[in-house]
Image: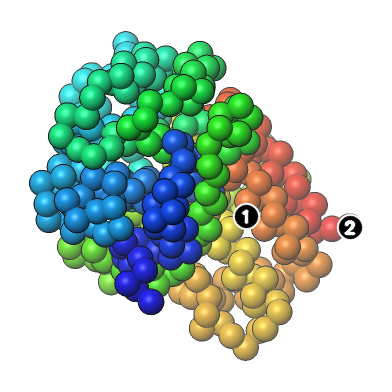
Amino acid sequence: MNQHLFNPELGHPEIQKKILHSIQSERLPHAFLFYGKEGTGKDAFAIEIAKLLNCEKGPLYICHKCPACIKISKQEHPDVKFVFPIPGSSNVKPEDIAEALQEKSQNPYKRISFEGKTTFISIDMIRELKYESKFKLYEGKKKVFIVSEADRMRPEAANALLKLLEEPPENLMLILVSSQIHRILPTIRSRSQLIHFAPLEGDAILKIVKKYTPQPPEHLASLIRLALGNIKLAFDFMEEDILDRRNQAVDFLRKVVIIEKSHELLIQIDKITASRDRRTMVLLLFFLLTWFHDAYHYKLSPDQKANFINSDLASNIEGFVNGYPDADYPRVINYTQTAIDDLEDPRNLNPALIFTDLSIKLNRSIKPR
Ligand SMILES: [Zn+2]
């Protein structure tokens, strides 16, 4: 079966087959829009498409060894561009951007982050792509421009991109990547071929993480379970002080259930949101989510404690479930997931409000009257 895939390690076999099929039938579109939840490997997949279309052994196979493949892996191929949101020019040095690109070339699954700074794709970045698109190929077979987190385009950047989509040069493949497709202009969506990326299977994530982490931590399998199918988050976890973050989540939950002491809860929310680093806040909520998953699990089948994500906290979770017998877990999980989505949307300007709103909803669903 693997012979029909161009890179089995990459996962998403159905998408691989679909793309190979469009190449064979000469129906490759000018633009793809890869969408789906964060951490499903969309950027990495887009980079592999650039190799597929430029590899000496392509376009149905990737050798990973020829100069084209190697240059694309290193983000050094003149016909392949990878664009991603960056902080405003007064806020960032060119070497920081070069370093981010360098990190992405070492691990295409990792998050590009500029420590709490607001990032976006400017019109200048899109103009540069348009300018580049007019040139003949330097050395490759096809230009491939990848726009990562395309939903972070400023409106004027999106309009500039639209013009490129309306009159696409013959030799250009444009790949837009987004985990917030509803933020992409409908006119851009309708001019791209949409491809949905489902979460990667746990096994696939485990293989990928092992490939990019020379000394994977002992608790790798449980880390990946914690990441709930989000590979970017799995790599985030590996750089975090996990236990510390989890304690913070449990602490927050404790304050939420005794919301009557609202002063303490507000202090806690202040603490959580003070850093303004949304990654940290999202990680905290993810831990909360795993706690609720475990609690729900326990409520449904109390004899399967061994399968807890937080198996070391089994007795605490058991105590929680018994202490709040009327808790509505599906609802609680849904609220937490929504709060995570809200936090990940940079247009939501007030994280404290998201946490306050969540606290009230959680309190009412854990202790319904
Ligand atoms: Zn090659």
**Dot label at residue 369:** 2
The image quadrant of residue 329 is: bottom right
Ligand 1 closer than 8 Å to label 2 CB: no
Q: Residue furthest top?
A: 90
**Residue 267 seen anywhere in this rendered image of the structure:** no
Name above or below for residue 18 compared with residue 115. below
Q: 27 or 188: which is nearer to us?
A: 27
The image quadrant of residue 145 is: top left
Quadrant location of the N terminus in the rendered image: bottom left
Residue for badge 1: 254
The residue that appears at 26% across and 59% down in the rendered structure is 61
329 on left or right of 188: right
The residue that appears at 26% across and 42% down in the rendered structure is 104
Quadrant location of the C terminus in the rendered image: bottom right
Crowd around label 2: few <14 · some 14–19 · many ≥20 (10 Å): few
Secondary structure category for the residue under label 2: loop
The residue that appears at 30% across and 58% down in the rendered structure is 60
Disc 2 residue type? Arg
Q: Residue furthest front?
A: 25
Q: Position of residue 205 (x, y in %)?
A: 38, 65
What whole-number distance in Å separates the C-alpha atoms at marks 1 and 2? 18 Å
Secondary structure category for the residue under label 1: helix
Crowd around label 1: few <14 · some 14–19 · many ≥20 (10 Å): few
324 on left or right of 175: right
Task: Check if mark 1's residue and mark 2's residue have beta carbons within 8 Å.
Answer: no
The image quadrant of residue 352 is: top right
354 on left or right of 276: right
**Residue 260 seen anywhere in this rendered image of the structure:** yes
Name above or below for residue 222 compared with residue 289. below
Q: Position of residue 266 (x, y in %)?
A: 63, 36
